[in-house]
């Protein structure tokens, strides 16, 4: 067993680019999470059918955004689209230990070995290996397992890290994003498919 608790409900709704940018803009404007929550719900800014869905989406997005440093948040709001997507992936990895570990132990590791196709078998091997140490994963139904696996691959495509035919795409981090991640936690570079020698050059 391990002290880290894996939550695989992370992937519901995908990267949520539009909703996250909307909430980030509101945070820059209002600076108050409760005021943002009220506005999102009262004006149905997520365009969903129920208040319960809106509350659930807001709670997840708030958690992702609160994991970011001010510098990372600024890149999310003002950076180029590619950097914005990389920050969205960063926020998701900081929010979900399961995704972070998959990114580091599977996505990044395969890229280093020049094994540039990511497969469902890679996910399954990671999942069932972790299930030996995480009882919460043993309780996941087969249907939920398959759905969340599909969702994670969709998120990787949305983040620009995986092609439509499941080729791993190298992350092209801008100098500003490199600085922001280095100041946050240099270990987070390993959530991206980037060469280890580049990471070493970014973290002297």
Image (cartoon, rainbow, N blue to C red):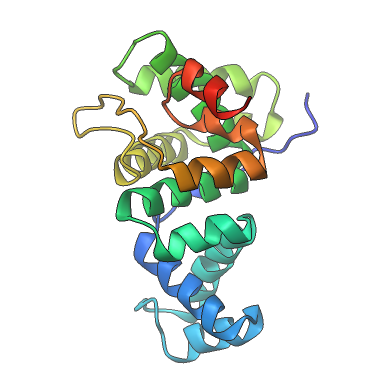
* Residue 200 located left or right of residue 133: left
Viewer-closest of 5 and 142: 5
* Residue 162 located left or right of residue 2: left
Q: Which residue occupies 41% across, 39% down? A: 173
Where is residue 11 drawn, in percent x and y? Answer: 46, 48
Where is residue 37 drawn, in percent x and y? Answer: 57, 81
Q: Which residue occupies 54% across, 74% down? A: 55
In the displayed structure, would residue 49 be above or below residue 174? below
Q: Please say whether residue 10 is visible from this viewpoint.
A: yes
* Residue 65 located left or right of residue 148: right
Q: Which residue occupies 50% across, 80% down? A: 26
* Residue 108 located left or right of residue 184: left
Q: Please say whether residue 102 is visible from this viewpoint.
A: no
Where is residue 160 drawn, in percent x and y? Answer: 30, 40
Where is residue 45 drawn, in percent x and y? Answer: 40, 82
Q: Quadrant of residue 59?
A: bottom right
Q: Which residue extends farthest left? A: 165
In the displayed structure, would residue 158 be above or below residue 57? above
Viewer-closest of 75 and 192: 75
Count the labels in the image: 0
Q: Quadrant of the N terminus?
A: top right
In the displayed structure, would residue 74 be above or below residue 55? above
Q: Quadrant of the C terminus?
A: top right
Q: Which residue occupies 38% across, 17% down? A: 121
Viewer-closest of 193 and 50: 193
In the displayed structure, would residue 164 be above or below residue 119? below
Q: Which residue extends farthest bottom? A: 42
């Amino acid at each position: 067993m391990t002290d880290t608790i894996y939550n695989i409900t992370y992937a519901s709704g995908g990267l949520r680019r539009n909703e996250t940018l909307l909430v980030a803009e509101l945070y820059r404007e209002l600076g108050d999470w409760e005021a943002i929550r009220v506005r999102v719900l009262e004006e149905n800014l997520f365009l969903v059918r129920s208040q319960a869905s809106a509350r659930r989406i807001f709670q997840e997005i708030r958690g992702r955004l609160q994991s970011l440093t001010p510098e990372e948040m600024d890149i999310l709001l003002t950076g180029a689209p590619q950097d914005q997507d990389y920050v969205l992936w960063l926020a998701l990895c900081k929010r979900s230990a399961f995704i972070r570990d998959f990114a580091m132990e599977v996505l990044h590791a395969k890229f280093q070995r020049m094994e540039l196709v990511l497969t469902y078998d890679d996910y399954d091997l990671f999942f069932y290996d972790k299930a030996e140490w995480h009882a919460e994963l043993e309780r996941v139904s087969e249907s939920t397992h398959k759905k969340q696996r599909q969702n994670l691959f969709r998120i990787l495509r949305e983040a620009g890290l995986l092609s439509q035919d499941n080729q791993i795409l190298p992350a092209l981090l801008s100098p500003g994003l490199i600085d922001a991640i280095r100041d946050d936690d240099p270990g987070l570079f390993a959530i991206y498919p980037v060469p280890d020698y580049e990471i070493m050059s970014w973290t002297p």
